[in-house]
Amino acid sequence: MHDESEPTVALQRLLDVHRRTISFLEVQRAYFGAFAPPYIWHQFDEARGEISRIKSELRALGVQVQDAPGDIAPPNPHPTNPAATDIDALLLVYRRMLIDQVRYAPQFMPSAWGNLYLQLTELYVERTFIPLHASGSNTSALYQEASSLFELMSKPGTRILLEGEAGSGKTTALQMLALACAARATGEPAEAANLVAAWPDPIPLPIFLKAREIATMLVSAGAAPDGMMQPGPSVFWSSIERWLQFSDLDALVPTIQQLLERGECLVMIDDLDDFPTEPQPHAYWIALGRFIARYPNNRYLLSWRALDSNAAASLINFVRYRIAPFEQQQIDEAVSRWYTAIGDFANLLLPEMVAERVAQLQGALNGDDRLLEVARTPRGVSLYVLAHAEGYSFPAERAIVLQRLAQGLMQGWEHMISEDVTSRNLSVHTPITGTTERWLTMLELLALAFQERLEPGNEQPSPLSYAEIKAYLSESRSIASFERRRGGIDMIAELIRWCCRCGLLASVGTESYTMPNRQLREYLAARALVQLPDFPARASMLGSDPQWHEALQMAVHGAKRGQRLSSTVKFLNILLESDDLKDEQVRVHVLLAAECLLEIGDRGQLGLTIEAKVCQLLTQMRDDAECPIAHRIQAGMLLGRLGDALREPELPVVVHVPAGTFILGYDQGFADETPRQEVYVPEFAIGMHPVTNREYKLFLDENRAVPRPHYWYDLRFNNPACPVVGVTWHDATNYCAWLTRRLTEMGKLAPGLVVRLPREVEWEKAASWDAQLQKQRRYPWGDEWDNTRANTADGRQNWYTAPIGCYPTGVSPYGAHDMIGNVWEWTIDQYRSYPNSSQPFDEAGRYTLRGSSCAAQPTHARCTYRSRLPPTAWRYHLGFRVVIGPPIDES
Amino acid sequence: MSSSTALIVDDSPEIRRLLNRSLASLDFTIIEAANGEEAVRLARECCPTVVVLDLCMPSMDGWEVVRHMRSDPALEEVPIIVITAYYGSTTIQSAQRAGCQYVVAKPFELREIVRMITMVTSRSNIQLPRYA
């Protein structure tokens, strides 16, 4: 008797199993005759491969093994080639079927208009792929050659494993490649065919499979590997076959096999992480490796989220690439393409509306870091565009996108637990149901717990153990009822696994997890927070910690939508209890209260008391030179967004400069500032501040035909209290002409006066002349440079404009603000040398700019410095201020 | 006289001469500056089509020239090709943040500079600097 555990016995038994398989297959082959389906040949191959392996192992162990007749393949095993003409027709049908399957963009969420069925070719934005090195050596990843997918796949035999998180556009890239290859043969859609125009012939036949569906198709075909047998390479063949059967293209099976043999296919399998983990974790991966070894010369493009780093070990000779997040330019292009496609779909939007909406959304996404972070993926962009087209505005309603993002992730979970994965139509989605929301509600408390585990200076919360997470999730009744219905399956374990797969949770170390996505965590925590009975008190305690501000703002936003205004009012009142602005905590509370007020949107229901108090405190803060500049600017921004009722926007605020002489120029500067000389300037009044976005908006509102300035929609520059930028000299003079008419009609302008751009001498006198001491100042405040008195790159470093009035100590003797820094200002004068210059010049056609800007360096941020531009030019740091004075004689 | 002007800024007269000679084929009017102050003054006066700038110079260095040019609207869009002996990812990143997209390692091949000048002068717009 042999011992059962002896390896030779186990091998002998396995040999018998495979030989019985051969006999069974022989019967099958006899039954089908010449029409035997190819999977039979594959299973022959597999079984014979195993037999030969086992025999050599047994021989190595010194066991005598007899050869059996079926151990070696008989000659000519493959079916005959059907008539070529029929095949061409069938391949055409196949390609058209594939085009129909992949031509629509995968929609992550249904929109308010239902499924939009948008064409992939209209939406596709070329992506960048960054090579990853298996060795893990991080040799300057920044400068590695990145390339486009169509270049990468152009060479026959290419094998690429593409990595990217959920929503990063992997599926779209695969679909586009399938579409392009199919379209090249059928001739349409031509845009797609052009993408592979440079590929050498023959263009490979695309085969597009989804890992999740491979298992499902095998189950429905009754061909799933059972517990005894490991899945072999034939599972891939069977699913290709099954897929062809769905479309009545069974007759194409032998042809496709031949093409695979010849290496003329492009095999794409999407989302490899979805391979079944039964009967063994990596069995399908190993089977795929063997399938590829069987047909080595084809192009392979596989995508995955890189969840299980060990899984890919069986994929030999694959180059790994990562899909790069969208750059700003790609976001702009994606927004424009999505919006145009939605506009075109059933004429949902008028074409002239689309252009403005696109500019609005692009400006919002590029100008707010929170929005930008989500918009780095195609999924993020599509959610923004759909919500924006429905009428949501950003960043005010950013919670809606986070809600939809979270809902989408949990919808995937619902699909999984209901095992509803049989549909092959790539763009059909079921609507969000109440249960999706219920899953989100379950995760709220967990998010709150993670948010509470944030430590100062650390963006990631400290991890929670599996048991702790389980405790939070078990509080929900939903889980218990699901577990009962599904016969005691550990739903919590499943849910945690799903959350790890979709990126909501990430495993750190053994059995402990964190919630890495900051925005989703804050959104979910905010939902939990607002439900708490002690929300106002709790929220005001958290209000001192800036890491909570975003969550608190979203909580207030949620409270407004949930009709819980009274708790918000309580919260705001607690925040505004103290008005001692010398205290940093008080300032932080006031700023938070203002942010929260903005979240409420329509503040009519709150009454005016809170808003008036907030505005008053913010104004104090902005005007207080003792207050840190960051707080002053934030206060100015918030005042701008809150409407700042204290300013009357209809009339320009001006300072008066009486007639008289002053000293122009600077002999130690550049040649164009010389010679220093005394000049007489008649009386005039000059704008106390540069013209703001709010003032310019009045002009635009009354003159619909006037084009919006550049950066008009850019959140970084379009705060109502900030100077208008991106205007040309013509825009500025048109504004002045309009204001002249307007003030004349209102009877506010004395006869003989106009509103116009300042002359250089007027500008310089208003900026630098101290009439009391009859002395010229180098800077509006004196002769010494002080970077706290003006918004320049020397002080702030971020090169953005600041709201007007934030630099009260930088005021000129006549009372004009921002004469240095913030924005360059157009003047009415062309760029010429001063009278009596030793180096005369005349650049007629270019207009002089004064005042330097937020990008300025101390080397030239002085009152006498001159720059110039043609009248059609615009810059992000170039605005203007007005003068009220006598008109200038053009001659 | 050609309408394109190249400003060459380097404290070494040999390198200026070398660059001057190799750019002659491109039909540029060449102006030369031996230090940062002179570079800024000449740039303001002539608004060159392209600037080839050595980063390491005594007194006002190349970075200051870049900062000045990028904050003056008249010079903001003039492409700057930076030459540096300290070629590395930090320098490249700093240069890109400051608004120079083109960085060449020293010692350089003249052909490389000529190719780059042809490329940058054929583009109309450069991107605004990106700030970290």
Image: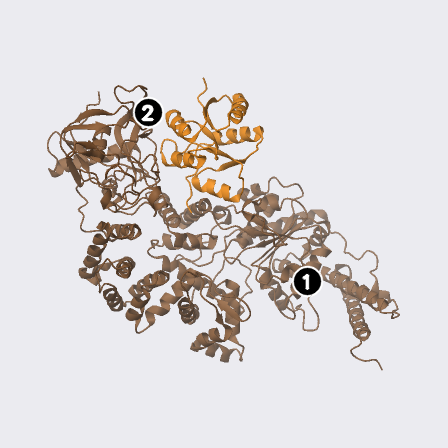
Chain colours: A brown, B orange
Return the residue nearer the eye: B115 or A200: B115
Query: Residue most toward the bottom?
Result: A1
Instruction: Name the amino acid, label 2.
Output: Ala
Where is residue A688, by image quadrant? top left
Give the spatial CA distance, label 2 vs label 1: 76 Å
Figure quadrant of the N terminus of chain A: bottom right
Instruction: Name the amino acid, label 1.
Output: Ile
What subunit carries mark 1? Answer: A
Where is residue A598, by image quadrant? bottom left
The answer, for residue A415, to whether it is visible in the render is: no
**Are the residues under badges 2 and 1 in a single subunit?**
yes
Identify the residue at image location x=36%, y=63%: A548
Q: x and y percent of residue A323 in the render?
A: 54, 51
The vertical placement of A593 against A299, above or below, is below
The reply, left or right, for residue A435 in relation to residue A296 is left
Q: Which residue is mark 2?
A: A671
Q: x and y percent of residue A321 in the render?
A: 59, 51
Query: Residue most toward the top?
Result: B1
Mark 2: secondary structure:
helix
The vertical placement of A229 against A353, above or below, is below
- Other-residue count near label 2 (Cα within 10 Å), few / some / many at <14 / 14–19 / ≥20: some
Q: x and y percent of residue A670 in the render?
A: 33, 27
Query: Mark 1 or mark 2, which is nearer the start of the sequence?
Result: 1
Q: x and y percent of residue A680 in the render?
A: 17, 25
Figure quadrant of the C terminus of chain A: top left
Return the residue nearer the eye: A270 or A551: A551
Mark drawn on residue A286 = 1
The answer, for residue A648, to whether it is visible in the render is: yes
Mark 1: secondary structure:
helix
Identify the residue at image location x=52%, y=44%: B89
